[in-house]
Image (spheres, rainbow, N blue to C red):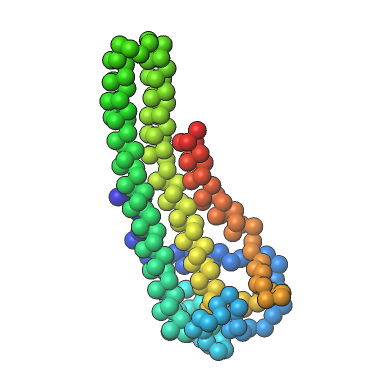
Amino acid sequence: FFFFFAFAFLDMKFVLAALLVLAIAAPFAAAQSCNNPLFAGFPLATAPAVVANNLCPQFNNKAQCCTANTISSLQQAFTSIRMALKGQADAQTTMKNALAQMPAQLDMVLSMLTQNPAIPADVKDKLTAAFAGVKTAAANFANNFPGTLSNCFKSVVTYAAGIFCFACDADWATYASVNNGKVALQLAQSTWTALQNGCTPVVTSMVNFVN
C-alpha cells in the first residue's frame, strides 16, 4: 500500500478511543445540558440520558446528549471523512508514481541536450548539475511526502473525532462559552501542538521540493 495506509481502513472506534482532543484548558462552571450551540440542528437528545455508545467510547453508558439517531449521523460523518481522505491518498499515490518516473524522463531530456553539439560544454555541465538536483529533490519528496501526509491525516482525523464526539458531551459548557452568538472553546495547548506536529512536516516537505 502507499499512504492510504493505516487510516484508509482505520477502525473508527480506535480513532475515537485514542484521544478526545477537546481538552480542558480553563474550566467554566456549568450544569449539564444538550444545548450545545456548535451542534444546533443536530439530532441531539433534549436532556442527558445514559446511552450505549460504542462509537464514542468515552461516553459509552454515561449520561450524554447522543441518541441512537445521533450516533448513526456521526458514523455517517466519519465515513464521509474517511472516504474523502482515501480520495486524497489515492491522488497522492498517483503523484508519487509520477515522481518515480521523473528521473528517467529527466535523463532522457538531459541526454538529448548533452549530445547537441550546438550547446557549449560549460552549459552542458550546468544542465547536468541542475538535472541532478531536480532528480534528488524529486526522489526525496517521493520518499518523504507520503509519510508526512499520513501523519497529518491521522492528526486531522483524531481532531475531527474529538470534535464530532463533543456533540455527545453533556458537559460541553465546562469548556465552552457563548458571547454575542459566538462560541469560544477552551482547548489545551497540546491539542494545537498535536495538529502542528502532525501537519507542519507536510508543508516543510513541499517547500523543500520547490526550493
Indicate the quadrant where residue 135 lies. Answer: top left
Q: Is residue 150 above or below residue 11?
A: above
Residue 179 left/right relative to 11: right
Residue 124 left/right relative to 41: left
Tell me what residue is drawn at x 40 percent, y 29 percent.
134
Q: Nearer the viewer, residue 12 or 130?
A: 130
Which x, y percent locates residue 21? 56, 64
Which x, y percent locates residue 201? 51, 44
Single out the residue that lies furthest toward the front: 118
The answer to whether residue 62 is seen in the rendering is no
Tell me what residue is drawn at x 44 percent, y 75 percent.
74
The answer to whether residue 102 is seen in the rendering is yes
Q: Nearer the viewer, residue 98 or 67?
A: 98
Tell me what residue is drawn at x 55 percent, y 73 percent.
166
Q: Nearer the viewer, residue 54 or 176?
A: 176
Tell me what residue is drawn at x 39 percent, y 24 percent.
132
Q: Is residue 143 above or below residue 24?
A: above
Which x, y percent locates residue 27? 70, 71
Which x, y percent locates residue 48? 56, 86
Single out the residue that lies furthest toward the bottom: 46
Disc tally is 0
Q: Is residue 133 above or below residue 61?
A: above
